[in-house]
């Protein structure tokens, strides 16, 4: 999982876990995101193909909006933000950096 979150530890239903896994692949900081066959099967076991498409499309629009905000410097980057401009040194510290 990209965000290093174990969904099985949370109070989530299997359907919610499938959506969280989709979001994990769609998140802007996951440049290598890909929905595996197992993830797709889990998603489709709880949602119709149309619903799965709508979930992914909504995620894509929101991710694109976030990218737009960063590209045009319309948001203030917090010190905890893992997204930095090219050539900048990230100040965000992930789990592996501790």
Image: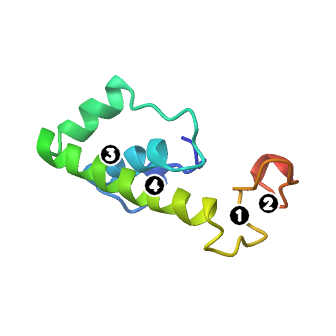
Judged left or right of residue 63, residue 3 is right
Q: Quadrant of the C terminus?
A: bottom right
Q: Which mark is residue 81?
A: 1
Rendered view: 32 above or below 25? above
Badge 3 or badge 4: first in the primary sequence: 3
At 85% from the left edge and 61% from the top edge, which residue is drawn?
A: 91
What is the CA distance from the residue labelled 1 to the residue labelled 3?
Answer: 25 Å
What is the CA distance from the residue labelled 3 to the residue labelled 4?
Answer: 21 Å
Residue at the far front: name it.
72
Circle 2 — which element?
Answer: loop
Disc 4 target residue: 64
Badge 1 or badge 3: first in the primary sequence: 3
Judged left or right of residue 35, residue 56 is left
Disc 3 target residue: 18
What is the CA distance from the residue labelled 3 to the residue labelled 2?
Answer: 28 Å
Which percent across, then down, holds residue 28?
54, 50
| Of the two numbered discs 4 and 1 in the rendering, the one whose residue sits closer to the viewer | 4
Quarter location, residue 30: top right
């Amino acid at each position: 999982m990209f965000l290093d979150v174990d969904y099985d530890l949370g109070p989530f239903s299997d359907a919610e876990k499938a959506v969280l896994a989709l979001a994990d692949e769609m998140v802007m900081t996951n440049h290598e995101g890909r929905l595996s066959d197992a993830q797709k099967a889990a998603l489709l076991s709880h949602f119709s193909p149309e619903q799965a498409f709508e979930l992914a499309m909504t995620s894509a629009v929101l991710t694109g909006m976030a990218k737009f905000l960063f590209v045009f410097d319309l948001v203030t980057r917090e010190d905890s933000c893992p997204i930095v401009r090219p050539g900048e040194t990230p100040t965000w510290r992930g789990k592996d950096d501790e």
